[in-house]
Amino acid sequence: MANPSIERRGAEEKLHLANNSYHLRFRSDAKLGWAYVPDDAQMTGGDAITVSLSRFQEALTRNDITHLGVRILPGEDVRLLQPYLARISLVELAFPTFRDGRNYSSARILREQLSYTGEIRAIGQVLADQLFFMVRCGIDALDLDPSVTHAAADAALSRFKYVYQAAGDARRPVWDARLSS
Amino acid sequence: MYKYDDFDHAIVNARVDEFRDQVARRVAGELSEDAFKPLRLMNGLYLQLHAYMLRVAIPYGTLSADQLRMLAHIARSYDKNYAHFTTRQNIQYNWIKLAEAPDLLADLARVEMQAIQTSGNCIRNITTDQFAGATAEEVADPRPYAELLRQYSTFHPEFSFLPRKFKIALTAAPHDRAAIKLHDIGLELYKNATGDIGWRVFVGGGMGRTPIIGKVLREFLPQAYFLGYIEAIMRVYNRYGRRDNIYKARIKILVHELGLEEFHRQVDAEWADIQKTFAEPPAVELERISAFFVNPTFETIATPVAIYDDARKTNPAFDHWVERNVCAHKQQGYSIVTISLKAVGEIPGDASADQMDTIAALADQYSFSDVRVTHEQNLVLPHVRQIDLFALWEKLKDIGLASDNVGLASDIIACPGMDYCSLANARSIPIAQDIAKRLAPIERSTGELKIKISGCINACGHHHAGHIGILGVDKKGEENYQLSLGGSAAEDTTLSTILGPGFDADGVVNAVEKIVACFNTIKRDNERFLDTYRRVGTAPFKEAVYG
Ligand code: SF4
């Protein structure tokens, strides 16, 4: 039987975050030290700055931001980013509660329809049982909820060898694998 | 029927392992009930009034005899010797011990069954016509498409955290036995004027607190775009369905609030984008799946079958059963048999382990090992030679499953209600039992009458679609029952209308009896209750009940 490999974008990197949780990243480019500028704070320049969608236009006009990231809340339309994708190095997709699945669609739209190749990071309530779905939708960096141990994350991500449908990652669906089995 | 290959087995087994691990962590106290709840719900395990309830998926209501034997084994080994078939063609076990649930799922996996996505805000079990592959009415067998959809929706990474649960039903016959217009998406396969086969797509149907009949979203969807179009609908719903209010979160509310035209526009825009990258499974995959659903090797049988006809003439009880429970088959000399799980006095939809074993044996002997589950909570043997019908009937009688009441007053749909369900406002089962007892003596002369009972507004008992619908409500701490008339879940789908003030448990049984008595005095010829109601409206029935 053919064995469709579990392909990930680049090598896995794990980092211990300050709040005792983990960050997993499946990219080969270097991780930058991102700083998020809250909506009520003074906009600053810097090497890697993330802003909300509402301050994104403002950030675009600045020439003192080297790498620009944008944070997308559930319900915000990632298609608005289309004209600027070349300028964006990080899209943070927020999952304030794991039950809110809107940003799974955002990830797939970014990857499959807008052909965005930069980093997509999940933040918020990023629980063990969501990780697999997130990665499948094209999210390639995960700020894990503090409850998720590295072992649990690993188990969740490697549990399913086969998948039934094509999505935002590089996995082949089983109907495709069947053709060559 | 469909057989798992190594890929399917690997996916389901991985899920069983995962759940075993989760249960172990819960039992060891590493996981709190709060953290465990969404995990167990993903595996169809609910905490009900008295115990854990496990809902097992029966994909598109099709079972092999071996699978049915396994369901019987599970009823014996893990439960109290019985189980409950649901209105979504699933089966529920009511008395499950948490620590045993992983073994139960492993047993199921051995016969290619599972409990994946039988709860949670995801795409639920795909349902279809229980006569699929046996009726001459259909343009094609809908089950290969249902299997495509099952695979597509299983662990769908984008659509596992939808605003609310999502139900898809399909049929390929003009006579709708799958209630497709009362589903989030309903799909009807038909042949258009130019002879092409494709889907009429309904969207936004559903029952519950706000019952709505599905609307036609697309008059003709060529088969080649099947999954891509579903994906477009799902994505619009996932992104824009309401998440602020659980009662307004189903797709029907989104369609209603946007208007069909705007919803249609959004789906088309999404679909145009999706088509650029979406790969439909190739024709060979549909062929691979379809090969599992080819006709069994039917014999060539000359009709009429004299022995069968003679038995009907000489044995009125057998004849009555044939009249109600046996339907035309596409193959000459064969019939479709519905086994009623509605024996008067029993719990609608329940079957004992012994009954399941016997039905499995009968399926082996008479129906190519094929068994179906209906949304009306009965079972079907889809391919029985007419020459065998009499013997089958006699064997069914031996196990108390020869009730000749399909489509009649005692063939009641009832949800588990207050006897099991933690959401219930009132009991459903005893009401069904009392009505069945009361009406059974006159049900044959009354003719087709679909009574449907729900124990709360969630409408699992399809009361909105009952010719007579009964809804249990809580009235200042007392069980109270609302009566409504005129619903239908068939191709002529309608929603029932509330008749008037509610009743207590005895009162509602009396009221139903009065309604039926009234009907029997005003019906014309062989008019069905539903048609009489549509002709005369509520007035005579109101008068009979409240006058
Ligand atoms: S209708 Fe209500 S009481 Fe009946 S099974 Fe559904 S949720 Fe439970």
Image (cartoon, rainbow, N blue to C red):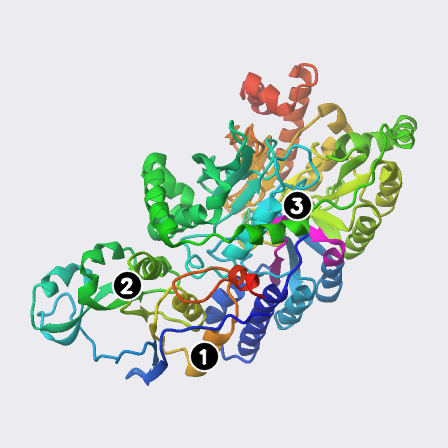
Q: Is mark 1 within 8 Å of ligand 1?
A: no
Are discs 2 and 3 both within one chain?
Answer: no
Q: Would residue B265 be found to the left or right of residue B199 on screen?
A: left
Q: Say which chain tag 1 marks.
A: A
Camera-nearest label, 1 or 3: 1
Residue under numbered circle 2:
A116
Confirm whether residue B172 shows in the render. yes
**Nearer-the-camera pick, A162 or B409:** A162
- Circle on res. B429: 3
Q: What stretch is highlighted in magenta?
A: B52-68
| Mark 2 residue type | Tyr
Confirm whether residue B211 shows in the render. no
**Secondary structure found at label 3:** helix
Q: Would residue B318 be found to the left or right of residue B118 on screen?
A: right
| Mark 1 residue type | Asp
Residue under numbered circle 1:
A154
Q: Where is residue A113 in the image (x, y as percent from the top left)?
A: 32, 56
- Distance Cα–Cα, label 2 vs label 1: 26 Å
Q: Say which chain tag 3 marks.
A: B
| Mark 3 residue type | Ile
Q: Residues within 10 Å of mark 3 (few under 14, many from 20)?
A: many
- Distance Cα–Cα, label 2 vs label 3: 55 Å
